[in-house]
Image (cartoon, rainbow, N blue to C red):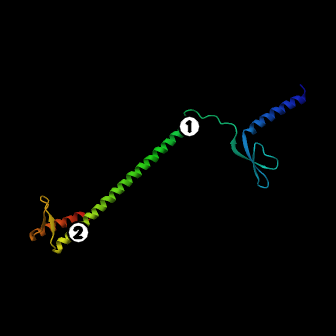
Amino acid sequence: MNATTVRSIIAAIVVTLFATTAHGQLLKCVGKDGRVEYAAQCPAGTKELATGIRSSPTPAAPAGGAAATKSQSLAERDAEFRKRQAEKAAAEAKDAKKSAEEAQRRRACEDARANLKNLQSGNRVLKVDSKTGERIFLEDAQYAGETANAQRMVDANCK
C-alpha cells in the first residue's frame, strides 16, 4: 500500500467515527440574525448549542432498578393522596356533626326559654297527659314545679 491509500483509509475511519458521534446528537444552530435551526451538524457562521437530544436509543434500565422505584413512588403518592382524601372527608363529617349538634342545642335552648317565659307570664298552660292523651290545664300548685323544670332545661341547654 502506498501513502495515499493509507491516508485515505485513515481519513475514512476518522470521518466514520465523527459521523457516528454527530449522528447520535441533535444540535441547535443559532445564526447571526437570531434564526434557529436544528441539525446534526451546524452550518458555517452559526453558533452551535447542544440540546441533549440523542437519536440513538438509551440502554434499557435494569429490571428491578429505577423503573420499580418510579412506579413505587407513584403508588406511594397515590396512597398518600387517598389518605389525605379520607382525612378530609372525616374532618368534614366531624364538622357537619358538630354543626348539627350545635343547631339542635340552639333549638332546645330557644324552646326551653320560650317555655320558661310562658310559665313565668302567668298564662294558662295546657299539657297533654301521656297516658290518656287528654289535654289538662296546669293548676296553680303545679306552676312552681314546672317553672323549676323549665329553668333547669334553660340552664342545661343554654350554655
Say which residue appears at 20% left-offset and 72% top-offset: 117
- Quadrant assignment, res 147: bottom left
Element at badge 2?
helix
Query: How many other residues sit within 10 Å of disc 2, few (<14), some (14-19) or many (≥20)?
Result: some
Amino acid type, callout 2: Arg
Say which residue appears at 84% left-offset and 33% top-offset: 11
Say which residue appears at 83% left-offset and 31% top-offset: 10
Decide which of tag 2 and tag 1 comes sooner along the chain: 1
Element at badge 1?
helix
Relative image position of residue 88 (x, y in whole percent)? 41, 52
- Out of 118 and 95, give the one closest to the viewer: 118
Tell me the quarter of the image containing the C terminus.
bottom left
Q: Is residue 92 left or right of residue 108?
A: right
Instruction: Quickly name the residue at label 2.
Output: 113
C-alpha span from label 2 to label 1: 69 Å
Instruction: Quickly name the residue at label 1.
Output: 67
Relative image position of residue 16 (x, y in whole percent)? 79, 34
- Out of 115 and 71, give the one closest to the viewer: 115
Q: Is residue 106 left or right of residue 62?
A: left
Amino acid type, callout 1: Ala
- Out of 88 and 13, give the one closest to the viewer: 88
Relative image position of residue 53 (x, y in whole percent)? 69, 43
- Quadrant assignment, res 132: bottom left
- Out of 21 and 38, give the one closest to the viewer: 38
